[in-house]
Each structure stands twice: as structure tokens, then as C-alpha cells.
Amino acid sequence: NAMLSWQRTAFHFQPERNWMNDPDGPMFYKGWYHLFYQYNPDSALWGNITWGHAVSTDLIHWLYLPLAMVPDRWFDANGVWTGSATILPDGQIAMLYTGSTNESVQVQNLAYPANLSDPLLLDWVKYSGNPVLTPPSGIGSTDFRDPTTAWIGIDGLWRTTIGSKVNKTGISLVYTTTNFIDYELLDGVLHAVPGTGMWECVDFYPVSINGSTGLETSVNGPGVKHVLKASLDDTKMDHYAIGTYFVENNTWIPDDPKIDVGIGLKYDYGRYYASKTFYDQNKERRILLGWINETDTETDDLEKGWSSLQTIPRTVLFDNATGTNLLQWPVEEIEDLRLNSTEFSDVLVEAGTVVPLDIGTATQLDIFVDFEIEVLEAESVNGSVGCGDGATDRSTLGPFGILVLADETLSELTPVYFRVSNSTDGDITTHFCADETRSSKAPEVYKTVYGDQVPVLDGETYSARVLVDHSIVESFAQGGRTVISSRIYPTEAIYGAARLFLFNNATGVNVKATLKIWQLNSAFIHPFPLDQI
Ligand code: DQQ
């Protein structure tokens, strides 16, 4: 269908056809990055959940492999749901995943590769004694899912944590094991936050305070903080907090209880869910994968024959400049897709104007932009905090930013912007936002204004990196402190008709923009030539 084919992306991972959701069991093994994913082999809608499988040597070019696990046993008959890989010191791989049983009870199952010498890990064996865990007493039979990568304590016990809820309190249970077959539930919970509901796809991992390399999942000690992430079934957002893990009493405590899991920070303020990290021992970094779901109708998804994408894999580090948040950044391998670039320096964008940027094709881009405010009015005070009602909502100090996937006449456009606010008491706050409300003329697609606060430190310019890929816009502010993924469906601003602009809708300030913009090549994402093995 030509009407919908332009929505296919060029360098984001997506299956050839049908439905995809959460990333599962990512790992680096014998030269290959492995991505498994929740997949429906039969339809562009969720159901019949199976593990799809793809491999890559660089996290950008992917090769589809045969399905890894299908729902063919009583302990996963209603779906091979989300799970995580643990690579053991002796080289074995323990894959723990949730099965929805023939009676729709959520249980945890163990699987392992049939042949560890196969770098592609084509064949998976489900342990004959599955399930290895059933819902403990006090936990609902459908509130027990998505085991994490395990970590080992100095006591030699492996630990995995599994999200759940008790009434409306989101919790994460911790089990110990020595063999991934027998488990003991630890007293208490790793953490609980009232009012947050069911915690799906919990992730738990260390970050280094000096923030330069990623840490293997079992690392703890001085100079280490721990990130706890939960995907909230209620908000459909991935919420995280940074804190300290006390292995001896099985508890994690947030640095700031006011920005606890589910009430504070989000990985991504756009369309993003069910993410998972893994430690990449190949490049000593922690990599975050996340699912971008659709915002069109199920009818459209069925017509186009596919649903959902994965984000560009991101590195995650602790931001030691702020001490309060993570930094997410596209993996460096994306830079290998760069073609020609165009630079602009100190482009003046006067209050209330739009400036075209002549760069040729604008559907596959890696954009770096820095803005400086030229203060016109001394002591401009602007009480209007937040993203406003979108990019047309003018205030003294913003919004200013770029218009991506815009057509020549600006009949479709997606503004990615900063909105600064300076209160009477001198508190300057900055929001980073993406306004999808005019992104598509298609009437039935969901369009909203996304965004949240971004820390901007003294002496910093307002800086963003924006990846544009046909129908996906991934935007990173201030080196990755605040991130927004947009899923949009332009109908005019496609292929050669897509343009890029600067805009400044502030009423009180001019801005100066400096940019470097690369065209990006397409990635190869196609079936593995299995006959060539
Ligand atoms: N998706 C899986 C569950 C998980 C949910 C089922 C999150 O395991 O809780 O497809 O998107």
C-alpha cells in the first residue's frame, strides 16, 4: 500500500511485517548483538506472543533470524512474554522469561541455548521443569512478570527482581538462586511506591558516579549508584530513579524521595515503553533499548501490515554534571550512517520568525543544534512554565527550536523546541518539548505535545540532537538529560517534500542558532542468509 509505505523507517529496527512490542534478552555474544522481541507472527496487532530474534554486529544493521521461542507449552501457551538474559561466568546463558500459562497465570520460565558454540544462538531449549517460579502468596496471578538480568552478590547468590503490585502500590520482588532452577523469595521488597500500580519490565543496574563507562550488572560498592526503572502499566511510561542499593537488607533507596520511581523522571517523555538495558562487555557500555509504539488506528496498522519500532540503541551514563539524572545518547555506531553534512553558524532567528535551512532531502537526518538567547528586554520575566499548548503558545523566552518533517508551506510540521521561563524570584527553568499537533493531516492519529523540564547549567547553550527517520523523531536535549521520541505520520512532508526550518516564537528575544546536520544513510535490516552458514 503506497499510502502507508513511507512510514517504514530507514535505520530503526522493525520487523519485516506484523506486530512487535518489548525488547527482550538483549546481549552481546560471540561477536553478535542479540535482540529478541515480543512478536506476533500472525498479525499487526498484539497477540500470540512469540520471541522474534535478530542479530547485529553494530546495533544499527540487523539481520532477522528464525523465531527463538513460540508459545507451545502449557507454561507459556498464552504467550512467551518478556524476559532477560544473564551470561554466567562459565559462559552459560540463563534466559528467564514470563510465560502466560494455559490458564493465563503469570509464571517465570527458564530457557537456554541448545548450542553455546553457535554465535547466532538459533535454537532455544525450554527447561523441562518449567515453570521455575509461580506467583507467591499475596500476589495476583496476573501481577507477576518480566524478570530482570540477574546479578550476583558477594555471598555467591544470584538475584533477579520481578515487578508486581499490591493494591495500588507498585513493587519489585527479589529472588535468590544458585542454579536458575530453585529460588528463594527474599523478605520485603527491593522497593515499593504507593499509587504507581503494576510495575512492568523492571530494570535494575549500577551506574558509575564518575559517569565515563558502563558497569556490568553485578558491580556494586563505592562510586556506584543504582538505577531502578519500572514501566508503569497505568501511565504507559518508563519511569526511573537513581539511588543506592543495600544488598545486605535487600533494599534500594532513592537519592531524593521526591523523584522516586513513578513520580519523578522518565527515560523518554514521548512514545516509549518497556525498555531494557544490558551491559555490552564488547565496548564497556550499558545500552538501553526501548519500544516505540504506534499512535495510529488498529485499522491503519492492519492495512500497513506492521506495528512498532525499537529506538536507536542508547548508551546510558550517570550525569555527574547535575548529579540528578541519567544521560542517554545514541550509540556511536549510528555515526557510520552519516553521509554529507551542512553547517550553519550564528543564524539569527528573530522573535516571531521561521528560517528555512537549505539542506536538500530532510527525511533521514542527524541534527545538532545550539541556541543562544540574545536578551532584548533586561530582566524579562515570564511566568509561563512548561511546554505550553504547543509551539504556537508564545511567551517572552520561547518557544524556539527546529521544525522537522515540515513541508514547504508548513501545512505539516513537528516543532522540537525549548521553552524557557524566568520567574519573578529569578528561577530559570527550561522545558524541552515536541509538538505533534500539526505533524500529520491524517485525522485519526493521536497527536499531542510532549516534553518536560531539562537541566541547563550555567554557561551552557540550549543544545539538542535530533534524529529524523521518516516517521520517527528522537530528540535529545543537553547531551541526553531529557529525551523525547515522537511517532508521527506525515502525509505531505514525506520523501523529497520534507524540509527543515528554524523557528522562534518567543515574543521577547531573538535567538542565534548554530547547526551541523548530516544526511543519514539507510541501514540494512533484512533476513539473515541462513543458507550461507
Ligand atoms: N509486555 C509483555 C509483558 C510486559 C508487557 C507482554 C509490557 O511481559 O509486562 O507482551 O509491554
Image (tube, helix red, strand yellow):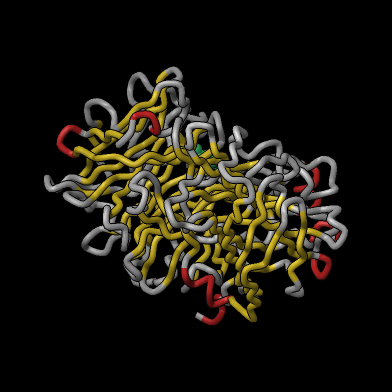
Q: Spot the residue most to the front.
A: 378
Residue placed at 56% from the left, 79% from the top? 531
| Image location (x, y in percent) of residue 335 | 53, 74
In the image: residue 516, left or right of residue 437: left
In the image: residue 313, left or right of residue 88: right
Res 75 → quadrant: top left
Front-lying residue, 41 or 212:
212
- Residue 419 position (above or below residue 503): above
Residue placed at 38% from the left, 60% from the top? 113
| Image location (x, y in percent) of residue 7 | 75, 58
| Image location (x, y in percent) of residue 94 | 32, 53
Question: What is the number of callouts on the image?
Answer: 0
On the rendered image, what quadrant is the N terminus found in?
bottom right
- Residue 402 position (above or below residue 74): below
- Residue 487 position (above or below residue 197): below
- Residue 2 position (above or below residue 227): below
Front-lying residue, 208 or 276:
208
Residue placed at 67% from the left, 55% from the top? 510
Front-lying residue, 177 or 169:
169
